[in-house]
Image (cartoon, rainbow, N blue to C red):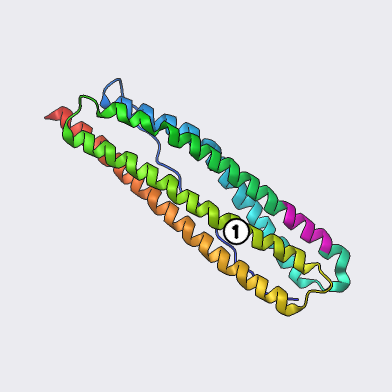
């Protein structure tokens, strides 16, 4: 019953920490970013739990593939645990999506920084806000792929305990899951790239503010 299942290697990047300034434009930017990060914290915590569950789940499936239908009791036990884990991951995914949704609402705080500032500062802050908005949109895409793949994994766990399932059916489902996992990994990479862009734009916004105050 052996068939290799590839993991997703889930690892989503986080934003850099906010800097600390006074009541100047730097301070207002720092406060805005700090508030956004505060709202994102549940998302980061959910990601850590999801990655841990995924690793354990991957191990359980490996054990399942070492068993045969004669080991039905142990097979059913492992499949049940793996299925429960998948449900928990989906629950955490929803928690993360909700947290990012709340964080996105805070983006309007960045609009306050543009007021009475030089054009270079306004442009830098607008780019920062857009990069953050893009990041949340990319996470929505990641979530869709992740949910679909988790559904395939649950189907696979069910097939593994079905007496009427032959090796061909299980093999096809494993391949579907592996393809899904590859898409999840690609979506995670895309999200991480948007996070890097946000961090770059944040540094440029701070630099623009600093330059405007010096000139």
Q: Is residue 64 left or right of residue 89?
A: right
Q: Is residue 49 left or right of residue 61?
A: left
Q: Position of residue 161 (x, y in %)?
A: 81, 67
State yes or no: residue 44 in magenta.
no
| Nearer the observer, 132 or 20 | 132
State yes or no: residue 82 in magenta.
yes
Q: Residue furthest left?
A: 215
For the N terminus, the image quarter is bottom right
Q: Is residue 130 left or right of residue 214?
A: right
Is disc 1 placed on a helix, strand or loop? Answer: helix
For label 1, the residue is 148
Is disc 1 surrounded by few (<14), some (14 to 19) or many (20+) residues within 10 Å?
Answer: some
In the image, what residue occupies the spot 11% across and 30% down? 215
Q: Position of residue 153 (x, y in %)?
A: 67, 62
Stretch in magenta: 76-84
| Nearer the observer, 158 or 1 | 158
Above or below, 45 against 35 in this view is below
Examine the image and state in which quarter residue 31 appears.
top left
Residue 135 shows up from this direction: yes
Q: Position of residue 209 (x, y in %)?
A: 22, 32
């Amino acid at each position: 019953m052996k068939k290799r299942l590839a993991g997703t290697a889930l690892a989503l990047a986080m934003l850099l920490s906010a800097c600390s300034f006074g009541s100047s434009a730097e301070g207002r930017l720092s406060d805005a970013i700090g508030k956004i990060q505060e709202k994102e914290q549940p998302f980061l915590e959910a990601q850590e739990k999801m990655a841990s569950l995924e690793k354990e789940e991957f191990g359980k499936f490996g054990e399942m593939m070492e068993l045969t239908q004669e080991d039905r009791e142990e097979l059913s036990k492992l499949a049940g645990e793996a299925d429960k884990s998948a449900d928990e991951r989906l629950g955490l995914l929803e928690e993360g999506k909700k947290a990012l949704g709340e964080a996105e609402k805070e983006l309007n705080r960045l609009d306050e920084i543009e007021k009475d500032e030089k054009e270079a500062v306004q442009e830098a802050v607008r780019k920062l806000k857009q990069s953050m908005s893009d990041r949340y949109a990319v996470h929505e895409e990641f979530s869709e792929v992740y949910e679909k793949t988790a559904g395939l994994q649950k189907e696979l766990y069910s097939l593994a305990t079905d007496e009427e399932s032959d090796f061909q059916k299980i093999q096809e489902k494993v391949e579907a899951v592996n393809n899904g996992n590859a898409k999840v990994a690609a979506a995670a990479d895309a999200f991480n790239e948007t996070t890097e862009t946000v961090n770059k734009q944040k540094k440029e916004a701070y630099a623009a503010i600093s330059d405007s105050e010096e000139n």
